[in-house]
Amino acid sequence: MLSIPEICQLFDDGGDAMYSGEAVSQRAHALQTATLAEQAGASAELITAALLHDLGHLLNPQGETPSERGIDDTHQYFAIPYLRGLFSPAVLEPIRMHVDAKRYLCATDVAYYDKLSADSKRSLALQGGVFSGDAATAFIARPYAADAVRLRLWDDLAKDAAMVTSALAYFAGLMAGCSLTPGNIADSR
Protein backbone atom coordinates (compact mmCIF):
# COMPACT_ATOMS: atom_id res chain seq x y z
CA MET A 1 0.00 0.00 0.00
CA LEU A 2 1.27 3.45 -0.89
CA SER A 3 1.20 6.35 1.53
CA ILE A 4 0.01 9.79 0.50
CA PRO A 5 3.58 11.18 0.52
CA GLU A 6 4.59 8.27 -1.73
CA ILE A 7 1.74 9.11 -4.12
CA CYS A 8 2.94 12.72 -4.20
CA GLN A 9 6.46 11.45 -4.91
CA LEU A 10 5.17 9.46 -7.88
CA PHE A 11 3.79 12.70 -9.32
CA ASP A 12 7.11 14.44 -8.59
CA ASP A 13 9.09 11.64 -10.26
CA GLY A 14 6.92 10.97 -13.31
CA GLY A 15 4.21 13.60 -13.45
CA ASP A 16 5.99 15.79 -15.99
CA ALA A 17 5.76 13.06 -18.64
CA MET A 18 3.26 13.99 -21.29
CA TYR A 19 -0.20 12.49 -21.07
CA SER A 20 -0.34 10.17 -24.09
CA GLY A 21 -1.14 12.06 -27.24
CA GLU A 22 -2.35 15.17 -25.40
CA ALA A 23 -1.04 18.69 -24.76
CA VAL A 24 -0.77 18.23 -20.98
CA SER A 25 1.47 16.31 -18.58
CA GLN A 26 0.35 13.42 -16.41
CA ARG A 27 0.36 15.77 -13.39
CA ALA A 28 -1.62 18.50 -15.18
CA HIS A 29 -4.19 15.95 -16.36
CA ALA A 30 -4.63 14.57 -12.82
CA LEU A 31 -4.90 18.04 -11.27
CA GLN A 32 -7.35 19.19 -13.93
CA THR A 33 -9.55 16.13 -13.48
CA ALA A 34 -9.61 16.68 -9.70
CA THR A 35 -10.31 20.39 -10.16
CA LEU A 36 -13.25 19.67 -12.45
CA ALA A 37 -14.60 17.19 -9.89
CA GLU A 38 -14.28 19.75 -7.13
CA GLN A 39 -15.94 22.45 -9.23
CA ALA A 40 -18.85 20.05 -9.81
CA GLY A 41 -19.31 19.62 -6.05
CA ALA A 42 -18.07 16.03 -5.88
CA SER A 43 -17.27 14.38 -2.57
CA ALA A 44 -13.68 14.26 -1.28
CA GLU A 45 -13.61 10.57 -2.23
CA LEU A 46 -14.64 11.24 -5.84
CA ILE A 47 -12.21 14.18 -6.11
CA THR A 48 -9.48 11.83 -4.87
CA ALA A 49 -10.53 9.21 -7.43
CA ALA A 50 -10.40 11.90 -10.12
CA LEU A 51 -6.88 12.86 -9.05
CA LEU A 52 -5.67 9.26 -8.97
CA HIS A 53 -7.62 7.71 -11.86
CA ASP A 54 -4.51 7.42 -14.06
CA LEU A 55 -1.99 6.65 -11.29
CA GLY A 56 -1.43 3.30 -13.00
CA HIS A 57 0.39 5.17 -15.78
CA LEU A 58 2.91 6.45 -13.22
CA LEU A 59 3.26 3.09 -11.50
CA ASN A 60 3.70 1.16 -14.74
CA PRO A 61 5.06 3.56 -17.38
CA GLN A 62 4.73 2.26 -20.92
CA GLY A 63 6.32 5.19 -22.75
CA GLU A 64 4.62 7.81 -24.86
CA THR A 65 1.27 6.79 -26.40
CA PRO A 66 1.33 3.01 -25.86
CA SER A 67 -1.96 2.64 -27.76
CA GLU A 68 -0.10 3.49 -30.98
CA ARG A 69 1.95 0.32 -30.36
CA GLY A 70 -1.15 -1.78 -29.64
CA ILE A 71 -0.60 -1.80 -25.87
CA ASP A 72 -3.46 -1.64 -23.38
CA ASP A 73 -1.62 -0.92 -20.14
CA THR A 74 -4.69 -1.76 -18.01
CA HIS A 75 -3.80 1.25 -15.87
CA GLN A 76 -7.28 1.30 -14.31
CA TYR A 77 -6.45 -1.97 -12.55
CA PHE A 78 -2.74 -1.52 -11.98
CA ALA A 79 -3.06 1.12 -9.25
CA ILE A 80 -5.76 -0.61 -7.19
CA PRO A 81 -3.48 -2.95 -5.17
CA TYR A 82 -1.28 0.05 -4.28
CA LEU A 83 -4.30 2.02 -3.03
CA ARG A 84 -6.28 -0.77 -1.33
CA GLY A 85 -6.20 -0.28 2.42
CA LEU A 86 -5.54 3.43 2.02
CA PHE A 87 -8.91 4.34 0.49
CA SER A 88 -12.46 3.02 0.54
CA PRO A 89 -14.36 1.62 -2.46
CA ALA A 90 -15.77 5.15 -2.98
CA VAL A 91 -12.27 6.05 -4.26
CA LEU A 92 -11.14 2.71 -5.67
CA GLU A 93 -14.20 1.71 -7.68
CA PRO A 94 -14.51 4.85 -9.84
CA ILE A 95 -10.78 4.48 -10.64
CA ARG A 96 -11.23 0.81 -11.55
CA MET A 97 -14.37 1.52 -13.59
CA HIS A 98 -13.42 4.70 -15.48
CA VAL A 99 -12.32 2.84 -18.62
CA ASP A 100 -15.56 0.85 -18.69
CA ALA A 101 -17.37 4.16 -18.23
CA LYS A 102 -15.92 5.24 -21.60
CA ARG A 103 -17.24 2.02 -23.14
CA TYR A 104 -20.63 2.73 -21.52
CA LEU A 105 -20.77 6.34 -22.73
CA CYS A 106 -19.95 5.27 -26.29
CA ALA A 107 -22.85 2.80 -26.13
CA THR A 108 -25.39 5.24 -24.70
CA ASP A 109 -24.47 8.57 -26.33
CA VAL A 110 -23.90 8.47 -30.07
CA ALA A 111 -22.13 11.86 -30.03
CA TYR A 112 -19.72 10.86 -27.26
CA TYR A 113 -17.37 8.78 -29.44
CA ASP A 114 -16.84 11.69 -31.85
CA LYS A 115 -15.66 13.88 -28.95
CA LEU A 116 -12.92 11.44 -27.91
CA SER A 117 -9.30 12.25 -28.66
CA ALA A 118 -7.45 10.08 -31.18
CA ASP A 119 -5.64 8.29 -28.35
CA SER A 120 -8.90 7.62 -26.48
CA LYS A 121 -10.38 6.10 -29.64
CA ARG A 122 -7.34 3.86 -30.13
CA SER A 123 -7.33 2.77 -26.51
CA LEU A 124 -11.10 2.10 -26.62
CA ALA A 125 -10.52 -0.58 -29.23
CA LEU A 126 -7.77 -2.14 -27.10
CA GLN A 127 -9.97 -1.99 -23.98
CA GLY A 128 -12.78 -4.07 -25.45
CA GLY A 129 -14.62 -1.55 -27.60
CA VAL A 130 -18.08 -0.12 -27.16
CA PHE A 131 -20.35 -2.00 -24.75
CA SER A 132 -23.34 -3.87 -26.12
CA GLY A 133 -26.72 -2.66 -24.89
CA ASP A 134 -26.90 -5.45 -22.30
CA ALA A 135 -23.35 -4.78 -21.09
CA ALA A 136 -24.10 -1.06 -20.77
CA THR A 137 -27.23 -1.80 -18.73
CA ALA A 138 -25.31 -4.18 -16.46
CA PHE A 139 -22.46 -1.69 -16.03
CA ILE A 140 -24.57 1.30 -14.97
CA ALA A 141 -26.45 -0.83 -12.42
CA ARG A 142 -23.23 -1.55 -10.50
CA PRO A 143 -22.30 0.38 -7.35
CA TYR A 144 -20.12 3.42 -8.13
CA ALA A 145 -20.80 3.23 -11.89
CA ALA A 146 -22.48 6.64 -11.92
CA ASP A 147 -19.43 8.10 -10.16
CA ALA A 148 -17.17 6.41 -12.73
CA VAL A 149 -19.18 8.04 -15.53
CA ARG A 150 -18.83 11.46 -13.90
CA LEU A 151 -15.09 10.87 -13.48
CA ARG A 152 -14.83 9.82 -17.14
CA LEU A 153 -16.48 13.03 -18.34
CA TRP A 154 -14.07 15.14 -16.26
CA ASP A 155 -11.20 12.99 -17.54
CA ASP A 156 -12.18 13.81 -21.13
CA LEU A 157 -12.16 17.56 -20.39
CA ALA A 158 -8.89 17.56 -18.45
CA LYS A 159 -6.60 18.11 -21.42
CA ASP A 160 -6.44 21.91 -21.51
CA ALA A 161 -2.87 23.26 -21.54
CA ALA A 162 -4.11 26.64 -20.25
CA MET A 163 -6.24 25.42 -17.32
CA VAL A 164 -5.21 26.71 -13.87
CA THR A 165 -5.54 24.31 -10.93
CA SER A 166 -4.64 24.09 -7.29
CA ALA A 167 -1.30 22.48 -6.49
CA LEU A 168 -0.85 18.81 -5.65
CA ALA A 169 -0.35 19.70 -1.96
CA TYR A 170 -3.91 21.01 -1.82
CA PHE A 171 -5.30 17.76 -3.19
CA ALA A 172 -2.98 15.77 -0.93
CA GLY A 173 -4.87 17.32 1.97
CA LEU A 174 -8.15 16.09 0.48
CA MET A 175 -6.63 12.63 0.05
CA ALA A 176 -5.57 12.62 3.70
CA GLY A 177 -9.09 13.57 4.72
CA CYS A 178 -10.56 10.46 3.13
CA SER A 179 -7.71 8.08 3.92
CA LEU A 180 -8.58 4.96 5.90
CA THR A 181 -5.16 5.04 7.54
CA PRO A 182 -5.05 7.34 10.57
CA GLY A 183 -2.13 9.70 10.57
CA ASN A 184 -1.43 9.24 6.85
CA ILE A 185 -0.74 12.87 6.04
CA ALA A 186 0.86 14.47 3.08
CA ASP A 187 4.14 16.24 3.38
CA SER A 188 4.12 20.02 3.10
CA ARG A 189 5.08 20.82 -0.49
Image (spheres, rainbow, N blue to C red):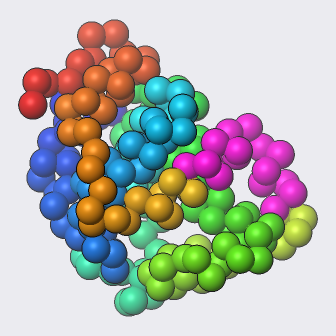
- Is residue 40 depicted above or below 175 in this figure? below
Image coordinates of residue 173 in percent, x first then y, are: 28, 23
In this rendered view, identify the residue nearer to me: 142 or 148: 148
User: Residue at 78% across / 54% down in the picture?
Assistant: 139
- Looking at the image, is 36 positioned above or below residue 58? above
Residue 20 picture location, percent across and down:
33, 75
Q: Main secondary structure of the magenta part?
A: helix
Q: Residue at x 37, y 65 (%)?
A: 159
- Give the position of the C terminus as an image quadrant: top left
> Quick one: quadrant of the N terminus?
top left
User: Is 57 a magenta residue?
Assistant: no
Q: Nearer the viewer, residue 16 or 60?
A: 16
Residue sitting at the far right: 134
Q: Nearer the viewer, residue 97 or 168?
A: 168
Viewer-proximal residue, 61 or 98?
A: 98
Residue drawn where x is 84% and y is 54% of the image: 138
Q: Which residues are magenta?
A: 136-151
Compared across the picture, whether 2 is left or right of 101 comes to left
Q: Left or right: where does residue 72 sit relative to residue 12?
A: right
Task: Place residue 165 in its image quadrant.
Answer: top left
Q: Which quadrant of the view contains residue 127?
A: bottom right
Regarding residue 81, the answer to whether it shows in the image is: no
Task: Give how far across and how far down residue 171 sits, in percent.
Answer: 30, 32
Could you tell me which residue is drawn at 73 percent across and 38 percent down?
A: 143
Q: Is residue 31 visible?
A: yes
Q: Does residue 138 belong to the magenta stretch?
A: yes
Left or right of 128, for residue 67 = left
